[in-house]
Amino acid sequence: MKQSQSTDDLLQKFIGHLKKNNRSEYTIIAYKKDVEQLIDFAKTKAGKLNIEDVTDEDIHEYFQSLNSSGEYTPKTVSRKLNSTRTFFKFLQNEGIIKDNPSNNVSHPKYDSEPPRVLSQTEYMALRDAAKNDVRISSIIEILLQTGIRIGELCRIKLEDVKIDSKTPHLHIAGYSNNANRDIPLNESAIIALKKYMSIRPDSKEDTLFITKNGHPLLVRNIRASIDNMFKKAKIQNAKVNDLRNTFIAHHISKGTNIYVLSKLVGHKRISTTEKYIGRIPTEKEDKITLSEL
C-alpha cells in the first residue's frame, strides 16, 4: 500500500485521470460533484478522515441514505454509484486501497424512458429558429446529420473535416474506450460546414468550432446555445442528445444495417442501438421523411 495522501489530493488526481482519458467535460463535472458528496458523507457521517478508510458498510449506509432521502431519482443514484465505483477503482489501481468497497452495492432498478425523437414540426422549427446564427445552425445540422455526441463535436479539429475527400466525412478521433471512426457527410452537412467555415474567425486554435474571440467552444457553451434554440422554437422537453436520437432512429427506419449503424454512432453494445427500433413517429404523429435527414 502507498503512503496515505490527503483526500483532496486524491480527488484532484482522480480528476486529472479522467481528463487524461478524454472523458467529457460533463462527465468530469458530474463525477467530481458525486465524489465530493461521498467524501462529505465519509467525513461527517461515517467519521472517516481518510477516504481509503471507508468500508463496505460505509458505502452501503451512504447509498441507503441517498435512496431514502427522496431527493434523488433511482437513475441519479445509479449514476452516483458509477461515479463511486470509478473513483474507488482508480484508488485501487493507484495502490491506495486493496479492495473496492463499492463493488457489493447494487444499482437501483428504474424504468428507462424511451429515446426522444424530434418530429417534423420540431425539426423544422429548430432549423428556423437557428437560421440567423450560422455557427449554431451549422452545429445543429452536424449533430442531426451525423449523430455524433456533443463532446465529440467539441473535439473536432480542422484537419478532421474531410469535405473535399472523394467520400466527404468527419474523422472522430478515438478517446477513452471509444475507437476512431469516420462519419459520412451528406449534402446538408457539407453545406452547413462550408457556410460556417466561410465566417469562422481567424484563430491559432485548430478546433473547428470556436468563439468569436477564437477560443474553443465548450460543451456547456453549445448545450446552452441549443437549449436557447429549443426555447425559441417552443420545443418542450428536448435536450441536445435528442438530435443524436433523431439521427439513429431515422437511420433504423430507413433500413440501415443495425450493426453498421452501431459502429457509426460509437455504441459499444448492439442492444443500445436496438432500443431505437420503432421510435419513429407515425405519419399522424408528424413524421419526418427520411429525405429530410
Image: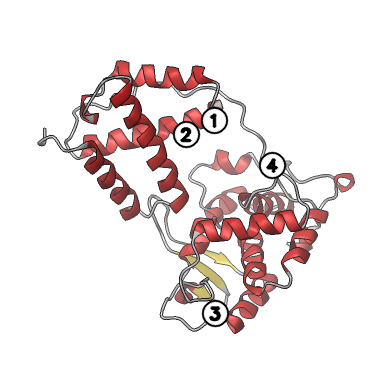
The residue lying at 31 percent from left, 19 percent from top is 58
Whether tag 1 and tag 4 are in contact, CB under 8 A, the answer is: no
Say which quadrant the N terminus sits in: top left
Question: Measured along the vertical axis of the image, is residue 73 above or below residue 214?
Answer: above
Q: Quadrant of the C terminus?
A: bottom right
Of labels 2 and 3, the one closer to you: 2
Name the mark on residue 277: 4
From mark 2 to mark 1, how far is it between C-alphas? 6 Å
Marks 4/3: CA distance?
Answer: 32 Å
Q: Which residue is mark 2?
A: 79
The residues tagged by marks 1 and 4 sit, at their Cα atoms, a distance apart of 23 Å
- Whole-angstrom CA distance, mark 2 to mark 3, is 41 Å
Taking the spot 76% from the left edge, 46% from the top edge, the residue there is: 280
Query: Residue 227 at what x, y percent from top left?
Result: 65, 54
- Crowd tier of the residue under label 2, counting other residues whose Cα lies within 10 Å: few below 14, some 14–19, many 20 or above: some
Q: Quadrant of residue 50?
A: top left
Which residue has dot 3 on it?
165
Q: Is residue 95 left or right of residue 11?
A: left
Which of the two labelled residues, at mark 3 and mark 1, occupies the earlier sequence position? Answer: 1
Q: Nearer the viewer, residue 130 or 95?
A: 130
User: Type of residue at label 1?
Assistant: Lys
**SS assignment at label 4:** loop
- Please report whichever mark, 1 or 4, sits nearer to the chain's N-terminal start: 1
Does residue 102 show up?
A: no
